[in-house]
Image: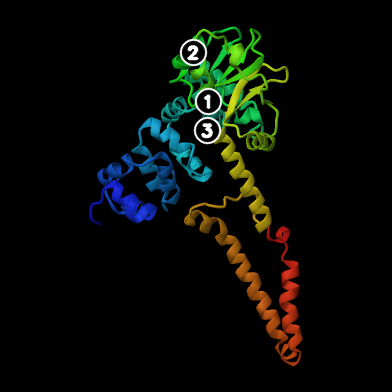
Amino acid sequence: MSAQTPESLSAVGGIERLVALVEESGTEAVATAVAALHPADLAELLNALPRADSRRGVFRLLEPATSATVMTKVSPATRLEILETMSAEDLRRIVEELDSDDAADLLGSVSKDRAQAVLQELPGSLSARIQQLLKYPSDTAGGLMKSEYAAVFEGATVEEAVEIVRTLAEAVADIHNVLVVDHRFHLLGVLPLSRLILARAGETVDAVMDRQVVSVTVDTDQEEVARLFRKYDLVSLPVTDPRGALLGRITVDDVVDVLEEEANEDFSKLSGLGEEEPLFDSPMRAIRRRLPWLGLNLLTTSLSASVIGLFQGTIQSMALAAALMTIVAAQGETPECRR
């Protein structure tokens, strides 16, 4: 295969050319190609590779920060496959690069013993936050939220709030709003970053914050969370405990995942697939998963054809019977039967 730059691979051949490069070229050529790819493209590449050793080989070439992001974007089957062969130290490095919600999701997909071993090696504050998130069901606001946020106490000046945002900018990703709390940490208001920047430095946050706060409690169902994001065009949603104390926030990227999950479930029900069956898995995984059932289906249809052959004379004399056979078969094939 002739040498190609990463740019020409993406522009000309897309993901298929990248797959061919991984399968046919040496480590150096592959490392050069993947170094220029966006994490989302890397995730797509890993999902598309037909062999497990190829997926693991590409993943080992990634820097910790990049591999952490890729792990949040690959399919569940690919993620589990990579995690199975990952050392505890590599897993710890990845967890440290992730937001608390993504870290909790990742550790929630491995055994409890392995997750506990990783948690013990993390800094105390990060370990405590992740362990708290792991207690919430994955389909609730608590399971979706991240514990990193920017908050100021009531009475703080705009200048002080701006300084807090600057201080937290590296540790807290995607700061859209500054949350205003009282000294018991009860949520009082929300101050959008755009309004904070335009406010006068000497004003207090109480004067410029929005007191009509849209928030949810940790036990709110994820479908209700998604509905609120759609209704109010939100990019971030505060999460509190039942008494109103601030615990975290949900960002729009997590809600997109929820909407996709709900859409996949609805599509699965309409098409008669099992809810847990992945819709967009790699061809090789789909073949391995479906081959036993396809073989059984071939056996039963062959048996049906043999039975029909016994009544060939009857069918020839009564053409209407042949038409009725297809109708009867269609009536019996409900989505429940296909499951």
Circle on res. 8: none
Front in this rendered view, residue 85 or 123: 123
Give the amino acid at mark 3.
Answer: Leu
| Residue 120 in the image, given as x and y percentages of width and height | 50, 20
Mark 1 against mark 3, which lies toward the viewer?
Answer: 1
Q: Which residue is mark 2?
A: 164
The residue carrying pointer 2 sits among few (fewer than 14), some (14 to 19) or many (20 or more) residues within 10 Å by Cα, namely: some
Label 2 vs 3, first from the N-terminus = 3
In the image: residue 9, left or right of residue 129 = left
In the image: residue 151, left or right of residue 16 = right
Determine whether the residue tagged by mark 3 lies in a helix, strand or loop: helix
Give the amino acid at mark 1.
Answer: His
Q: Quadrant of the rendered structure where residue 258 is?
A: top right
Determine whether the residue tagged by mark 2 lies in a helix, strand or loop: helix
Decide: marks 2, 1 in contact (CB < 8 A)?
Answer: no
In the image: residue 253, left or right of residue 302 = left
- Vertical side of 132 occupied by 60: above or below: below
Determine whether the residue tagged by mark 1 lies in a helix, strand or loop: loop
Front in this rendered view, residue 297 or 319: 319
Residue 109 in view here: no
Q: Which residue is mark 3?
A: 106
Q: Residue at image x 65%, y 48%?
A: 265
Mark 2 against mark 3, which lies toward the viewer?
Answer: 2
